[in-house]
Amino acid sequence: MELLLPILLGFLAALIGGLYLLGVFRQRRPGEPPLDKGLIPWLGHVLEFRRDTLKFLERMKQKHGDVFTIQLGGFYITFLQDPLSFGSLVKESREKLDFSKFAMHLVRKVFGYAAVEGDHAILHTSSNKHLKGDGLEVMTQAMMSNLQNLMLHNIGSAAEQSTWIEDGLFMYSYNIVFRAGYLSLYGNEPHKSEGSEEKDRVESEALFYEFRKYDQLFPNLAYGVLLPKKRLEAERLMGLFWNSLSVTKMKKKDNISRWIWDIQQAKEEMGMDESMINKYMFVLLWASQGNTGPSSFWLLLFLMKHPEAMKAVKGEVDTLLKESGQEVQRGGPLVNLTREMLMKTPILDSAVEETLRLTAAPLLTRAVLQDMTLKMADGREYFIRKGDRMAVFPYIAVHIDPEIHPDPQSFKYDRFLNPDGSKKTDFYKAGKKVKYYNMPWGAGVSMCPGRFFATNELKQFVFLMLVYFEFELKNPDETIPEIDFSRWGFGSMQPQRDVEFRYRLRY
Ligand code: HEM
Protein backbone atom coordinates (compact mmCIF):
# COMPACT_ATOMS: atom_id res chain seq x y z
CA MET A 1 0.00 0.00 0.00
CA GLU A 2 2.82 2.32 0.92
CA LEU A 3 4.36 1.73 -2.50
CA LEU A 4 1.09 1.95 -4.38
CA LEU A 5 0.18 5.44 -3.18
CA PRO A 6 3.13 7.31 -4.76
CA ILE A 7 2.59 5.37 -8.00
CA LEU A 8 -1.10 6.29 -8.01
CA LEU A 9 -0.32 9.91 -7.20
CA GLY A 10 2.32 9.99 -9.93
CA PHE A 11 -0.12 8.53 -12.42
CA LEU A 12 -2.79 11.06 -11.41
CA ALA A 13 -0.35 13.96 -11.77
CA ALA A 14 0.73 12.72 -15.21
CA LEU A 15 -2.91 12.34 -16.24
CA ILE A 16 -3.86 15.82 -15.07
CA GLY A 17 -0.71 17.24 -16.70
CA GLY A 18 -1.56 15.44 -19.93
CA LEU A 19 -5.16 16.67 -19.89
CA TYR A 20 -3.89 20.17 -19.14
CA LEU A 21 -1.57 20.01 -22.15
CA LEU A 22 -4.47 18.75 -24.24
CA GLY A 23 -6.29 21.94 -23.32
CA VAL A 24 -9.12 20.16 -21.50
CA PHE A 25 -9.12 22.62 -18.58
CA ARG A 26 -8.99 25.84 -20.52
CA GLN A 27 -12.03 27.97 -19.81
CA ARG A 28 -13.09 31.32 -21.17
CA ARG A 29 -12.12 34.05 -18.69
CA PRO A 30 -14.10 37.27 -18.26
CA GLY A 31 -13.31 39.72 -21.05
CA GLU A 32 -11.99 37.06 -23.43
CA PRO A 33 -13.56 36.28 -26.83
CA PRO A 34 -15.97 33.31 -27.04
CA LEU A 35 -13.98 30.06 -26.77
CA ASP A 36 -14.78 27.03 -28.94
CA LYS A 37 -12.50 24.09 -28.20
CA GLY A 38 -14.25 21.54 -30.41
CA LEU A 39 -14.94 18.00 -29.30
CA ILE A 40 -11.55 16.37 -29.77
CA PRO A 41 -8.96 17.17 -27.06
CA TRP A 42 -5.89 19.01 -28.37
CA LEU A 43 -6.89 18.58 -32.05
CA GLY A 44 -10.00 20.70 -31.48
CA HIS A 45 -11.53 21.71 -34.80
CA VAL A 46 -8.54 20.86 -36.96
CA LEU A 47 -10.30 18.24 -39.09
CA GLU A 48 -13.21 20.49 -40.06
CA PHE A 49 -10.87 23.45 -40.50
CA ARG A 50 -8.67 21.42 -42.87
CA ARG A 51 -11.62 20.00 -44.81
CA ASP A 52 -12.96 23.42 -45.82
CA THR A 53 -11.54 26.43 -43.97
CA LEU A 54 -14.01 28.82 -45.53
CA LYS A 55 -17.11 26.85 -44.57
CA PHE A 56 -15.81 26.24 -41.07
CA LEU A 57 -14.95 29.89 -40.39
CA GLU A 58 -18.31 31.02 -41.79
CA ARG A 59 -20.00 28.63 -39.35
CA MET A 60 -17.93 29.95 -36.43
CA LYS A 61 -18.69 33.54 -37.39
CA GLN A 62 -22.39 32.81 -37.46
CA LYS A 63 -22.18 31.10 -34.08
CA HIS A 64 -19.87 33.51 -32.23
CA GLY A 65 -19.74 36.81 -34.14
CA ASP A 66 -16.67 38.54 -35.52
CA VAL A 67 -14.15 37.60 -32.78
CA PHE A 68 -13.73 34.05 -31.44
CA THR A 69 -11.03 31.74 -30.16
CA ILE A 70 -10.82 28.18 -31.44
CA GLN A 71 -8.58 25.26 -30.66
CA LEU A 72 -6.60 23.89 -33.63
CA GLY A 73 -3.96 21.19 -33.21
CA GLY A 74 -2.81 22.34 -29.77
CA PHE A 75 -2.99 26.06 -30.54
CA TYR A 76 -5.61 28.54 -29.43
CA ILE A 77 -6.23 30.93 -32.29
CA THR A 78 -8.34 34.06 -32.03
CA PHE A 79 -9.90 34.97 -35.35
CA LEU A 80 -10.65 38.62 -35.96
CA GLN A 81 -13.26 38.94 -38.69
CA ASP A 82 -14.31 42.59 -38.45
CA PRO A 83 -12.51 44.45 -41.26
CA LEU A 84 -13.01 47.81 -39.57
CA SER A 85 -10.83 46.51 -36.72
CA PHE A 86 -8.04 44.97 -38.81
CA GLY A 87 -5.74 47.87 -37.95
CA SER A 88 -5.53 46.46 -34.39
CA LEU A 89 -3.82 43.33 -35.70
CA VAL A 90 -1.92 44.79 -38.62
CA LYS A 91 -0.46 47.73 -36.70
CA GLU A 92 0.09 46.11 -33.30
CA SER A 93 3.71 46.32 -32.12
CA ARG A 94 6.03 43.40 -32.88
CA GLU A 95 6.62 42.98 -29.14
CA LYS A 96 3.02 41.83 -28.85
CA LEU A 97 2.11 40.25 -32.18
CA ASP A 98 4.90 38.53 -34.05
CA PHE A 99 4.88 37.24 -37.62
CA SER A 100 8.34 35.72 -37.84
CA LYS A 101 7.95 33.10 -35.10
CA PHE A 102 5.12 31.46 -36.96
CA ALA A 103 6.81 31.86 -40.37
CA MET A 104 10.09 30.38 -39.06
CA HIS A 105 8.32 27.25 -37.95
CA LEU A 106 6.60 26.86 -41.33
CA VAL A 107 9.65 27.42 -43.55
CA ARG A 108 11.62 24.88 -41.53
CA LYS A 109 8.89 22.30 -42.01
CA VAL A 110 8.17 22.84 -45.69
CA PHE A 111 11.46 24.09 -47.17
CA GLY A 112 14.06 22.80 -44.71
CA TYR A 113 15.27 26.35 -44.10
CA ALA A 114 16.35 27.35 -40.59
CA ALA A 115 15.53 31.04 -40.35
CA VAL A 116 17.91 33.42 -38.57
CA GLU A 117 17.67 36.89 -37.09
CA GLY A 118 18.04 39.49 -39.82
CA ASP A 119 16.34 37.43 -42.55
CA HIS A 120 13.36 39.70 -42.78
CA ALA A 121 15.45 42.86 -42.92
CA ILE A 122 17.55 41.46 -45.79
CA LEU A 123 14.43 40.41 -47.70
CA HIS A 124 12.81 43.79 -47.31
CA THR A 125 15.90 45.84 -48.16
CA SER A 126 16.37 43.93 -51.39
CA SER A 127 12.64 43.96 -52.22
CA ASN A 128 12.35 47.71 -51.67
CA LYS A 129 15.27 48.28 -54.02
CA HIS A 130 14.44 45.82 -56.77
CA LEU A 131 10.75 44.92 -56.71
CA LYS A 132 9.37 48.44 -56.81
CA GLY A 133 10.23 51.87 -58.21
CA ASP A 134 13.14 51.99 -60.66
CA GLY A 135 14.22 48.44 -59.86
CA LEU A 136 10.95 47.21 -61.26
CA GLU A 137 11.86 48.64 -64.67
CA VAL A 138 14.66 46.07 -65.05
CA MET A 139 12.49 43.22 -63.79
CA THR A 140 9.69 44.16 -66.18
CA GLN A 141 12.06 44.13 -69.16
CA ALA A 142 13.44 40.73 -68.17
CA MET A 143 9.93 39.33 -67.76
CA MET A 144 8.92 40.72 -71.15
CA SER A 145 11.72 39.02 -73.01
CA ASN A 146 11.31 35.70 -71.17
CA LEU A 147 7.54 35.69 -71.72
CA GLN A 148 8.00 36.26 -75.43
CA ASN A 149 10.68 33.59 -75.71
CA LEU A 150 8.34 31.07 -74.11
CA MET A 151 5.01 32.13 -75.59
CA LEU A 152 6.14 32.44 -79.17
CA HIS A 153 8.28 29.31 -79.24
CA ASN A 154 5.63 27.33 -77.51
CA ILE A 155 3.60 27.27 -80.70
CA GLY A 156 6.41 25.80 -82.85
CA SER A 157 5.42 25.01 -86.44
CA ALA A 158 1.76 25.79 -85.77
CA ALA A 159 2.82 29.42 -86.19
CA GLU A 160 3.40 28.81 -89.90
CA GLN A 161 -0.06 27.49 -90.57
CA SER A 162 -1.90 29.55 -87.95
CA THR A 163 -3.52 26.34 -86.75
CA TRP A 164 -5.33 26.16 -83.44
CA ILE A 165 -3.46 24.61 -80.52
CA GLU A 166 -5.47 23.04 -77.73
CA ASP A 167 -4.39 23.02 -74.11
CA GLY A 168 -5.66 23.22 -70.53
CA LEU A 169 -5.90 26.91 -69.63
CA PHE A 170 -4.67 26.38 -66.07
CA MET A 171 -1.61 24.37 -67.08
CA TYR A 172 -0.83 26.67 -70.00
CA SER A 173 -1.01 29.88 -67.94
CA TYR A 174 0.79 28.45 -64.90
CA ASN A 175 3.51 26.94 -67.08
CA ILE A 176 4.28 30.13 -69.01
CA VAL A 177 4.07 32.53 -66.07
CA PHE A 178 6.04 30.27 -63.72
CA ARG A 179 8.85 29.73 -66.22
CA ALA A 180 9.10 33.36 -67.32
CA GLY A 181 9.04 34.52 -63.69
CA TYR A 182 11.66 31.96 -62.70
CA LEU A 183 14.01 32.91 -65.56
CA SER A 184 13.58 36.62 -64.79
CA LEU A 185 14.49 36.16 -61.14
CA TYR A 186 17.06 33.35 -61.21
CA GLY A 187 18.73 34.18 -64.53
CA ASN A 188 19.25 32.74 -67.99
CA GLU A 189 21.70 30.29 -69.47
CA PRO A 190 24.90 32.20 -70.39
CA HIS A 191 24.27 33.97 -73.68
CA LYS A 192 27.64 32.99 -75.06
CA SER A 193 26.64 29.34 -74.95
CA GLU A 194 25.01 28.01 -78.11
CA GLY A 195 21.22 27.63 -78.08
CA SER A 196 20.89 29.47 -74.77
CA GLU A 197 17.22 30.34 -75.33
CA GLU A 198 16.42 26.73 -76.12
CA LYS A 199 18.29 25.65 -72.97
CA ASP A 200 16.25 28.15 -70.92
CA ARG A 201 13.06 26.67 -72.29
CA VAL A 202 14.06 23.07 -71.61
CA GLU A 203 15.45 23.71 -68.13
CA SER A 204 12.51 25.82 -66.98
CA GLU A 205 10.02 23.28 -68.33
CA ALA A 206 11.70 20.49 -66.33
CA LEU A 207 11.69 22.65 -63.20
CA PHE A 208 8.01 23.52 -63.61
CA TYR A 209 7.17 19.83 -63.94
CA GLU A 210 8.81 19.11 -60.56
CA PHE A 211 7.39 22.28 -59.00
CA ARG A 212 3.85 21.16 -59.80
CA LYS A 213 4.45 17.88 -57.97
CA TYR A 214 5.60 19.77 -54.90
CA ASP A 215 2.78 22.27 -55.27
CA GLN A 216 0.23 19.49 -55.04
CA LEU A 217 1.81 18.03 -51.90
CA PHE A 218 2.18 21.43 -50.28
CA PRO A 219 -1.09 21.89 -48.31
CA ASN A 220 -0.79 18.51 -46.58
CA LEU A 221 2.92 19.01 -46.03
CA ALA A 222 2.24 22.36 -44.34
CA TYR A 223 -0.39 20.76 -42.09
CA GLY A 224 1.97 17.87 -41.34
CA VAL A 225 -0.45 15.21 -42.55
CA LEU A 226 1.39 13.72 -45.56
CA LEU A 227 1.42 9.94 -45.79
CA PRO A 228 4.96 8.49 -45.40
CA LYS A 229 5.37 7.71 -49.12
CA LYS A 230 4.35 11.22 -50.10
CA ARG A 231 6.53 12.67 -47.36
CA LEU A 232 9.51 10.88 -48.96
CA GLU A 233 8.52 12.31 -52.35
CA ALA A 234 8.32 15.81 -50.83
CA GLU A 235 11.81 15.35 -49.35
CA ARG A 236 13.17 14.19 -52.72
CA LEU A 237 11.67 17.27 -54.37
CA MET A 238 13.10 19.59 -51.72
CA GLY A 239 16.56 18.14 -52.39
CA LEU A 240 16.08 18.62 -56.12
CA PHE A 241 15.18 22.30 -55.68
CA TRP A 242 18.04 23.00 -53.26
CA ASN A 243 20.35 21.61 -55.90
CA SER A 244 18.75 23.22 -58.96
CA LEU A 245 18.70 26.66 -57.33
CA SER A 246 22.09 26.34 -55.67
CA VAL A 247 24.37 29.34 -55.37
CA THR A 248 27.10 27.51 -57.31
CA LYS A 249 24.78 26.83 -60.24
CA MET A 250 23.32 30.28 -60.23
CA LYS A 251 26.68 32.00 -60.27
CA LYS A 252 27.19 30.53 -63.75
CA LYS A 253 24.03 32.19 -65.09
CA ASP A 254 23.48 35.48 -66.89
CA ASN A 255 20.92 38.12 -65.87
CA ILE A 256 20.29 36.98 -62.30
CA SER A 257 17.92 39.54 -60.85
CA ARG A 258 19.39 42.00 -58.40
CA TRP A 259 16.66 40.91 -55.96
CA ILE A 260 18.07 37.37 -55.77
CA TRP A 261 21.67 38.49 -56.09
CA ASP A 262 21.57 40.98 -53.22
CA ILE A 263 19.84 38.48 -50.93
CA GLN A 264 22.47 35.83 -51.70
CA GLN A 265 25.30 38.28 -51.09
CA ALA A 266 23.84 39.54 -47.82
CA LYS A 267 23.45 35.99 -46.54
CA GLU A 268 26.99 35.11 -47.54
CA GLU A 269 28.25 38.22 -45.77
CA MET A 270 26.44 37.27 -42.57
CA GLY A 271 28.31 33.95 -42.71
CA MET A 272 25.42 31.69 -43.60
CA ASP A 273 26.32 28.23 -44.78
CA GLU A 274 26.00 27.84 -48.56
CA SER A 275 23.72 24.82 -48.22
CA MET A 276 21.36 26.93 -46.11
CA ILE A 277 21.37 29.75 -48.69
CA ASN A 278 20.38 27.15 -51.30
CA LYS A 279 17.41 26.24 -49.14
CA TYR A 280 16.42 29.88 -48.89
CA MET A 281 16.50 30.10 -52.68
CA PHE A 282 13.75 27.48 -52.65
CA VAL A 283 11.73 29.54 -50.13
CA LEU A 284 11.92 32.45 -52.54
CA LEU A 285 11.01 30.30 -55.54
CA TRP A 286 7.92 29.14 -53.74
CA ALA A 287 6.90 32.63 -52.61
CA SER A 288 7.52 34.17 -56.01
CA GLN A 289 6.17 31.48 -58.34
CA GLY A 290 3.40 29.66 -56.48
CA ASN A 291 0.73 32.35 -56.82
CA THR A 292 1.17 34.31 -60.02
CA GLY A 293 0.58 31.35 -62.39
CA PRO A 294 -2.77 30.32 -60.84
CA SER A 295 -3.86 33.99 -60.72
CA SER A 296 -3.06 34.43 -64.42
CA PHE A 297 -5.33 31.47 -65.17
CA TRP A 298 -8.29 33.00 -63.30
CA LEU A 299 -7.74 36.37 -64.92
CA LEU A 300 -7.81 34.95 -68.46
CA LEU A 301 -10.75 32.70 -67.65
CA PHE A 302 -12.84 35.53 -66.16
CA LEU A 303 -12.12 37.67 -69.22
CA MET A 304 -13.12 34.82 -71.54
CA LYS A 305 -16.34 34.23 -69.62
CA HIS A 306 -17.24 37.94 -69.57
CA PRO A 307 -17.22 39.33 -73.11
CA GLU A 308 -17.89 42.91 -71.94
CA ALA A 309 -14.79 42.71 -69.73
CA MET A 310 -12.71 41.19 -72.53
CA LYS A 311 -13.86 43.94 -74.91
CA ALA A 312 -12.95 46.71 -72.47
CA VAL A 313 -9.51 45.24 -71.68
CA LYS A 314 -8.76 44.51 -75.34
CA GLY A 315 -9.76 48.07 -76.25
CA GLU A 316 -7.35 49.43 -73.64
CA VAL A 317 -4.53 47.17 -74.81
CA ASP A 318 -5.01 48.07 -78.50
CA THR A 319 -5.03 51.79 -77.72
CA LEU A 320 -1.90 51.48 -75.63
CA LEU A 321 -0.08 49.60 -78.39
CA LYS A 322 -1.15 52.12 -81.01
CA GLU A 323 -0.16 55.09 -78.87
CA SER A 324 3.29 53.59 -78.44
CA GLY A 325 3.64 53.48 -82.23
CA GLN A 326 3.92 49.69 -82.35
CA GLU A 327 2.16 47.15 -84.51
CA VAL A 328 2.25 43.36 -84.38
CA GLN A 329 3.21 41.88 -87.73
CA ARG A 330 4.30 38.50 -88.95
CA GLY A 331 8.10 38.53 -88.93
CA GLY A 332 8.08 42.04 -87.41
CA PRO A 333 9.91 43.08 -84.24
CA LEU A 334 8.73 41.79 -80.87
CA VAL A 335 6.38 44.01 -78.94
CA ASN A 336 7.96 46.15 -76.25
CA LEU A 337 5.64 46.79 -73.35
CA THR A 338 7.42 49.14 -70.99
CA ARG A 339 6.73 49.71 -67.30
CA GLU A 340 5.55 53.19 -68.24
CA MET A 341 2.94 51.71 -70.58
CA LEU A 342 1.89 49.32 -67.84
CA MET A 343 1.09 52.28 -65.64
CA LYS A 344 -1.63 53.43 -68.04
CA THR A 345 -4.03 50.52 -67.79
CA PRO A 346 -6.78 51.36 -65.28
CA ILE A 347 -9.23 48.84 -66.77
CA LEU A 348 -6.77 45.97 -66.69
CA ASP A 349 -5.72 47.02 -63.17
CA SER A 350 -9.31 46.78 -62.00
CA ALA A 351 -9.75 43.38 -63.69
CA VAL A 352 -6.59 42.11 -61.94
CA GLU A 353 -7.77 43.41 -58.58
CA GLU A 354 -11.21 41.84 -59.08
CA THR A 355 -9.60 38.50 -60.03
CA LEU A 356 -7.50 38.55 -56.86
CA ARG A 357 -10.52 39.49 -54.76
CA LEU A 358 -12.27 36.34 -55.92
CA THR A 359 -9.34 33.93 -55.94
CA ALA A 360 -6.62 34.99 -53.48
CA ALA A 361 -7.32 33.80 -49.94
CA PRO A 362 -4.35 34.09 -47.58
CA LEU A 363 -4.59 33.40 -43.86
CA LEU A 364 -2.61 35.96 -41.87
CA THR A 365 -1.30 34.57 -38.60
CA ARG A 366 0.58 36.16 -35.71
CA ALA A 367 1.99 34.72 -32.47
CA VAL A 368 0.85 36.51 -29.28
CA LEU A 369 4.04 37.29 -27.32
CA GLN A 370 2.45 39.17 -24.39
CA ASP A 371 -0.97 39.29 -22.77
CA MET A 372 -2.75 42.04 -24.65
CA THR A 373 -6.04 43.82 -25.23
CA LEU A 374 -7.62 43.73 -28.66
CA LYS A 375 -9.39 47.03 -29.28
CA MET A 376 -12.23 46.86 -31.77
CA ALA A 377 -13.32 49.80 -33.94
CA ASP A 378 -16.72 49.93 -32.20
CA GLY A 379 -15.14 50.22 -28.75
CA ARG A 380 -15.35 46.57 -27.64
CA GLU A 381 -12.22 45.20 -25.98
CA TYR A 382 -11.02 41.61 -25.62
CA PHE A 383 -8.21 40.10 -23.56
CA ILE A 384 -5.90 37.89 -25.58
CA ARG A 385 -3.52 35.47 -23.84
CA LYS A 386 0.22 35.23 -24.31
CA GLY A 387 1.12 31.99 -26.12
CA ASP A 388 -2.03 32.03 -28.27
CA ARG A 389 -2.20 33.05 -31.90
CA MET A 390 -4.23 35.63 -33.72
CA ALA A 391 -5.46 35.29 -37.30
CA VAL A 392 -7.35 37.08 -40.02
CA PHE A 393 -8.96 35.41 -43.02
CA PRO A 394 -9.80 38.37 -45.24
CA TYR A 395 -11.58 36.31 -47.87
CA ILE A 396 -14.72 35.99 -45.73
CA ALA A 397 -14.30 39.19 -43.74
CA VAL A 398 -13.68 41.43 -46.75
CA HIS A 399 -13.49 39.85 -50.21
CA ILE A 400 -16.95 38.28 -50.24
CA ASP A 401 -18.72 40.51 -47.73
CA PRO A 402 -21.80 41.72 -49.67
CA GLU A 403 -21.88 44.97 -47.75
CA ILE A 404 -18.40 45.92 -48.94
CA HIS A 405 -18.62 44.30 -52.38
CA PRO A 406 -22.24 43.95 -53.51
CA ASP A 407 -23.02 40.75 -55.45
CA PRO A 408 -19.68 39.42 -54.22
CA GLN A 409 -19.60 36.13 -56.14
CA SER A 410 -19.83 37.89 -59.53
CA PHE A 411 -16.80 38.97 -61.50
CA LYS A 412 -17.20 42.69 -62.26
CA TYR A 413 -14.16 43.90 -64.16
CA ASP A 414 -14.90 47.56 -63.30
CA ARG A 415 -15.57 47.05 -59.57
CA PHE A 416 -12.37 48.93 -58.75
CA LEU A 417 -13.00 51.81 -61.16
CA ASN A 418 -14.72 55.13 -60.50
CA PRO A 419 -17.17 56.42 -63.13
CA ASP A 420 -14.45 58.83 -64.34
CA GLY A 421 -12.12 55.88 -65.01
CA SER A 422 -9.82 56.45 -62.03
CA LYS A 423 -9.00 53.76 -59.43
CA LYS A 424 -11.77 53.24 -56.90
CA THR A 425 -10.62 53.03 -53.30
CA ASP A 426 -13.81 54.01 -51.43
CA PHE A 427 -15.65 51.01 -50.01
CA TYR A 428 -17.95 51.08 -46.99
CA LYS A 429 -19.30 48.83 -44.26
CA ALA A 430 -21.93 50.00 -41.80
CA GLY A 431 -21.48 53.51 -43.21
CA LYS A 432 -17.75 53.51 -42.36
CA LYS A 433 -14.94 53.59 -44.88
CA VAL A 434 -13.09 50.27 -45.08
CA LYS A 435 -9.34 50.76 -45.33
CA TYR A 436 -8.57 47.11 -46.05
CA TYR A 437 -11.11 46.53 -48.83
CA ASN A 438 -9.07 43.91 -50.73
CA MET A 439 -6.23 41.90 -49.18
CA PRO A 440 -4.74 39.43 -51.68
CA TRP A 441 -1.25 40.51 -50.57
CA GLY A 442 -1.84 40.29 -46.83
CA ALA A 443 -1.07 43.37 -44.72
CA GLY A 444 1.41 44.84 -42.26
CA VAL A 445 4.89 43.38 -41.69
CA SER A 446 4.36 40.33 -43.86
CA MET A 447 2.62 42.06 -46.76
CA CYS A 448 3.80 40.62 -50.05
CA PRO A 449 6.95 42.48 -51.14
CA GLY A 450 6.50 41.15 -54.69
CA ARG A 451 3.04 42.65 -55.24
CA PHE A 452 4.09 45.29 -57.79
CA PHE A 453 6.12 42.81 -59.80
CA ALA A 454 3.34 40.20 -59.55
CA THR A 455 0.74 42.67 -60.83
CA ASN A 456 3.02 43.55 -63.72
CA GLU A 457 3.58 39.88 -64.55
CA LEU A 458 -0.17 39.28 -64.74
CA LYS A 459 -0.69 42.34 -66.90
CA GLN A 460 2.21 41.50 -69.22
CA PHE A 461 0.95 37.96 -69.73
CA VAL A 462 -2.61 39.09 -70.56
CA PHE A 463 -1.30 41.90 -72.75
CA LEU A 464 0.82 39.51 -74.82
CA MET A 465 -1.98 36.95 -75.06
CA LEU A 466 -4.25 39.66 -76.43
CA VAL A 467 -1.84 41.17 -78.92
CA TYR A 468 -0.34 37.94 -80.25
CA PHE A 469 -3.15 35.41 -80.04
CA GLU A 470 -6.75 34.66 -80.75
CA PHE A 471 -8.03 32.36 -78.04
CA GLU A 472 -11.33 30.85 -76.99
CA LEU A 473 -12.81 28.20 -74.71
CA LYS A 474 -13.20 24.86 -76.42
CA ASN A 475 -16.68 24.61 -74.95
CA PRO A 476 -18.32 28.07 -75.11
CA ASP A 477 -20.74 27.00 -72.36
CA GLU A 478 -17.91 26.01 -70.03
CA THR A 479 -18.65 26.84 -66.41
CA ILE A 480 -16.09 28.37 -64.04
CA PRO A 481 -14.61 25.48 -62.05
CA GLU A 482 -14.94 25.26 -58.28
CA ILE A 483 -12.04 26.33 -56.11
CA ASP A 484 -9.92 23.52 -54.62
CA PHE A 485 -10.93 23.74 -50.93
CA SER A 486 -7.73 22.13 -49.69
CA ARG A 487 -5.77 25.31 -50.42
CA TRP A 488 -7.73 27.97 -48.48
CA GLY A 489 -5.26 30.09 -46.60
CA PHE A 490 -2.28 29.45 -48.89
CA GLY A 491 -2.57 32.50 -51.18
CA SER A 492 -3.82 32.16 -54.76
CA MET A 493 -6.39 29.43 -55.04
CA GLN A 494 -6.35 26.74 -57.70
CA PRO A 495 -9.31 25.25 -59.60
CA GLN A 496 -10.63 21.75 -58.94
CA ARG A 497 -10.20 20.94 -62.63
CA ASP A 498 -8.63 22.43 -65.73
CA VAL A 499 -10.55 24.13 -68.54
CA GLU A 500 -9.80 23.31 -72.18
CA PHE A 501 -9.11 26.20 -74.53
CA ARG A 502 -7.48 26.81 -77.91
CA TYR A 503 -5.27 29.54 -79.24
CA ARG A 504 -3.48 30.56 -82.43
CA LEU A 505 -1.37 33.44 -83.66
CA ARG A 506 -3.51 36.35 -84.71
CA TYR A 507 -1.24 37.53 -87.55
C1 HEM B 1 -0.53 36.89 -57.48
C2 HEM B 1 0.65 36.73 -56.94
C3 HEM B 1 0.97 36.81 -55.49
C4 HEM B 1 0.14 36.76 -54.39
C5 HEM B 1 -1.37 36.63 -54.37
C6 HEM B 1 0.98 36.86 -53.22
C7 HEM B 1 0.51 36.88 -51.91
C8 HEM B 1 1.31 36.95 -50.79
C9 HEM B 1 0.82 37.00 -49.43
C10 HEM B 1 -0.64 36.99 -49.02
C11 HEM B 1 1.89 37.06 -48.60
C12 HEM B 1 1.88 37.21 -47.08
C13 HEM B 1 1.76 35.92 -46.38
C14 HEM B 1 1.58 36.09 -44.88
O1 HEM B 1 1.32 37.16 -44.37
O2 HEM B 1 1.70 35.08 -44.22
C15 HEM B 1 3.07 37.02 -49.44
C16 HEM B 1 4.36 37.01 -48.95
C17 HEM B 1 5.46 37.02 -49.77
N1 HEM B 1 5.50 37.16 -51.14
FE1 HEM B 1 3.90 37.21 -52.37
N2 HEM B 1 2.30 36.96 -53.61
C18 HEM B 1 2.34 36.95 -54.98
C19 HEM B 1 3.46 37.05 -55.77
C20 HEM B 1 4.74 37.25 -55.31
C21 HEM B 1 5.90 37.49 -56.14
C22 HEM B 1 5.89 37.60 -57.66
C23 HEM B 1 6.98 37.58 -55.30
C24 HEM B 1 8.43 37.87 -55.60
C25 HEM B 1 8.94 38.26 -56.72
C26 HEM B 1 6.50 37.38 -53.95
C27 HEM B 1 7.28 37.35 -52.83
C28 HEM B 1 6.81 37.18 -51.54
C29 HEM B 1 7.67 37.03 -50.39
C30 HEM B 1 9.20 36.99 -50.40
C31 HEM B 1 6.83 36.91 -49.27
C32 HEM B 1 7.24 36.74 -47.79
C33 HEM B 1 7.20 38.09 -47.13
C34 HEM B 1 7.67 38.11 -45.71
O3 HEM B 1 8.13 37.10 -45.19
O4 HEM B 1 7.56 39.19 -45.12
N3 HEM B 1 5.13 37.20 -54.00
N4 HEM B 1 2.69 36.99 -50.77
Image (spheres, rainbow, N blue to C red):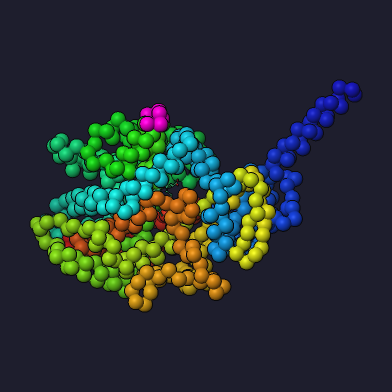
Vertical relation: 10 (above or below) 139? above
In what quadrant of the picture does the N terminus appear?
Answer: top right
Residue 66 picture location, percent across and down: 61, 62
- Report whether residue 476 is seen: no
Percent position (x, y) of residue 253? 24, 36
Q: Toward the viewer: 67 or 377?
A: 377
Query: Residue 286: x and y, percent?
Result: 39, 44
Q: Residue at x 47, y 39 (%)?
A: 107
Q: Residue furthest left?
A: 331
Q: Which segment did they paint magenta? A: 269-274
The quadrant where residue 186 appears: top left
Residue 165 can be seen, yes or no:
yes
Q: In screen coordinates, is 92 left or right of 453?
A: right
Identified at 32% across, 69% down, the residue is 347
Seen from this angle, which residue lies furthest bottom?
A: 419
Quarter of the image where the C terminus is located: bottom left
Residue 344: where, in percent of width, then height? 27, 66
Q: Please check the rendered image and state whether residue 7 is part of the magenta-colored stretch, yes or no.
A: no
- Give the residue drawn at x 50%, y 39%: 104
Residue 408 drawn above or below residue 23: below
Q: Nearer the viewer, residue 392 or 174?
A: 392
Q: Is residue 41 above or below residue 503?
A: above
**Residue at x-position 34% and y-position 47%:** 129
